[in-house]
Amino acid sequence: MENLPQPAHPSVGADILAALDAEERGFVLGMLLRADAQEQEPAPAIDAPVPPIPAAPSAARCDEAIAMVVALPRTERLRVMGVLAREALAPWPPGIENVHHDVLCDVLQAESTAVVRQMAAGGGPNAVRRAAEAELMRRRDGNTTGEPADNDLLLSSATQAALVDLQRAVLVSIVPVPPAPLGTTLHRLGRRLAVLTPSALLTEVTDAGADLLGTSLRGADADALKRAIAHVGAPWSERILEIARQDTDPHAEEDHAAGRARARVLVSATTPAESPRRTLERLGARALGDRLGREDPDQTLAVAQRLPRDLGRELLAGAEAATPSGPHAD
């Protein structure tokens, strides 16, 4: 696949692929490769199994993308396939620079010191290097770095291909998040959240917490509102008050009541933090997890890995409660 042509423009095929997550892109690539092979004369025998068909609604997204790519001129189709192949063969998971430091540190704790040293010394993403350096420091402080020197020698003599395989094995639990093309509006909730920068994602989470708390406080008295927004800080305190005081449309009173009841369930299920602001962030993580569980469960873990450890737990718990038979259920 290395000789496939590069896209003439970054946008070639990008809009077609924008809504697809990494697993869906892999399926689309597999099907496109089979279709391309069958077009050749004479058509070669294809021994590779057909990739497992994704479940709905993923299957519909994949079918649409495949149909759109197949309809392109062959040169453009090969360019799109090249984009997908380069993502699949990348030495590091796409989007790893936005994975939270806590998550990467947790992953590296399970590895040998020689492997962690390699991850710190390699020319990989800064996020991985910083996490590896932090893990080495933790082990030095705890005097837990003692290992046979042969381990370091073995890695130092490994081929580049072997080191790439090692990187992939160490980071296999990290969900790849392909980038979204500039200027593209993502309507799929999980993709939209997962491609955000860490600061933008935290703002989105905090906004969701303010919306959830405000919704849960509809109908509350003034004293309850005052206590709820104490120390939260602007602009979220104003947002909470605005939502809590919104007039209810008489024609949608049942919907408002159901929304308030659902919000109160989520608020009561959220683990309080030491500070009101952090509690607001946890409320937002719980609320977004609830939405992801209902709308886009396949991207729940990807979003959770881009949040601090406690917020990721709240998001996963919210998603699991919304989809008891989903991927995070026991």
Image: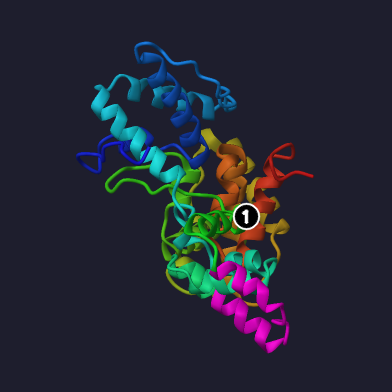
- Which residue is labeled 1 in the image? 315
**On the rendered image, what quadrant is the C terminus found in?**
top right
Give how far across and how far down residue 60 sits, in percent: 49, 24
Left or right, 88 with reference to 36: right
Give how far across and how far down residue 307 sits, in percent: 55, 62
Q: Quadrant of residue 143?
A: bottom right
Q: Looking at this view, is 140 or 285 the one in front?
A: 140
SS state under label 1: helix
Left or right, 181 with reference to 278: left
**On the rendered image, what quadrant is the N terminus found in?**
top left
Q: Quadrant of residue 284?
A: bottom right
Q: Residue at x 66, y 86 (%)?
A: 140
Over which residues does the magenta segment extend?
132-156
Q: Residues within 10 Å of mark 1 (few under 14, many from 20)?
A: many
Q: Main secondary structure of the magenta part?
A: helix
Q: Residue at x 57, y 28 (%)?
A: 54
Q: Residue furthest right?
A: 330
Q: Residue furthest top?
A: 42
Give how far across and how far down residue 312 sits, in percent: 62, 59
Q: Can I make out residue 163 in this image?
A: yes
The image shows residue 233, relative to residue 241, as above or below, that is below
Q: Can I make out residue 219 in this image?
A: no
> Is residue 305 in the magenta section?
no
The image shows residue 153, relative to residue 169, as above or below, that is below
Q: Residue at x 44, y 65 (%)?
A: 125
Q: Looking at this view, is 207 or 231 the one in front?
A: 207
